Image: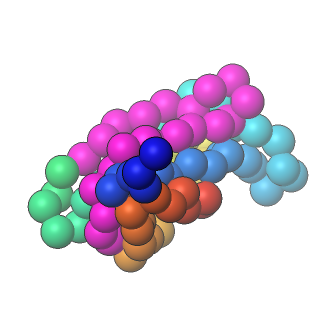
């Protein structure tokens, strides 16, 4: 089997106490093209964005009652998984 030319971003959204935040909205943006992917966390706070082209990404997470989370310059490489 050949190595994949795509990568992934995965993670779990939690509150300050460590409890999962279900239904949080995520926007993952490829910084070079501004192409976006919209996701929602599962009941356990998990999310996954598979099959991303290599490059730099920005992730923004919002949920009612919480501050907005923004992280830029996440580097996704071919065949890798970045956990945020």
User: In the picture provided, is 20 more to the left or to the right than 55?
Assistant: right
The residue drawn where x is 52% and y is 40% is 48
With respect to residue 27, does 54 lie above or below? below
With respect to residue 56, does 47 lie above or below? above
45 falls in the magenta region? yes
x%, y% of residue 47? 56, 38
x%, y% of residue 75? 41, 72
Q: How many marks?
A: 0
- Residue farthest right in this picture: 17
User: In the picture provided, is 46 more to the left or to the right than 77?
Assistant: right
50 falls in the magenta region? yes
The residue drawn where x is 73% and y is 30% is 44
The residue drawn where x is 61% and y is 59% is 83
Which of the 4 image quarters holds residue 58?
A: bottom left
Which contiguous range is marked in magenta? 36-59
- Residue farthest left in this picture: 33
User: In the picture provided, is 79 more to the left or to the right than 38?
Assistant: right
x%, y% of residue 46? 64, 37
x%, y% of residue 5? 33, 56
Q: Nearer the viewer, residue 26 or 35?
A: 35
- In this view of the protein, can residue 3 be seen by the observer? yes
Q: Nearer the viewer, residue 83 or 60?
A: 83
> Which secondary structure is most common in the magenta stretch?
strand
Task: Look at the image and tell me in which quarter the C terminus lies.
Answer: bottom right
The residue drawn where x is 30% and y is 41% is 37
Q: Nearer the viewer, residue 21 or 49?
A: 49
């Amino acid at each position: 089997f050949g190595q994949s030319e795509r990568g992934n971003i995965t993670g779990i959204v939690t509150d300050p106490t460590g409890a999962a935040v279900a239904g949080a909205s995520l926007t993952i943006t490829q910084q070079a093209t501004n192409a976006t992917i919209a996701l929602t966390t599962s009941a356990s706070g998990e999310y996954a964005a598979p099959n991303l082209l290599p490059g730099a990404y920005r992730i923004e997470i919002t949920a009612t009652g919480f501050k907005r989370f923004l992280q830029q310059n996440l580097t996704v490489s071919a065949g890798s998984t970045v956990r945020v």
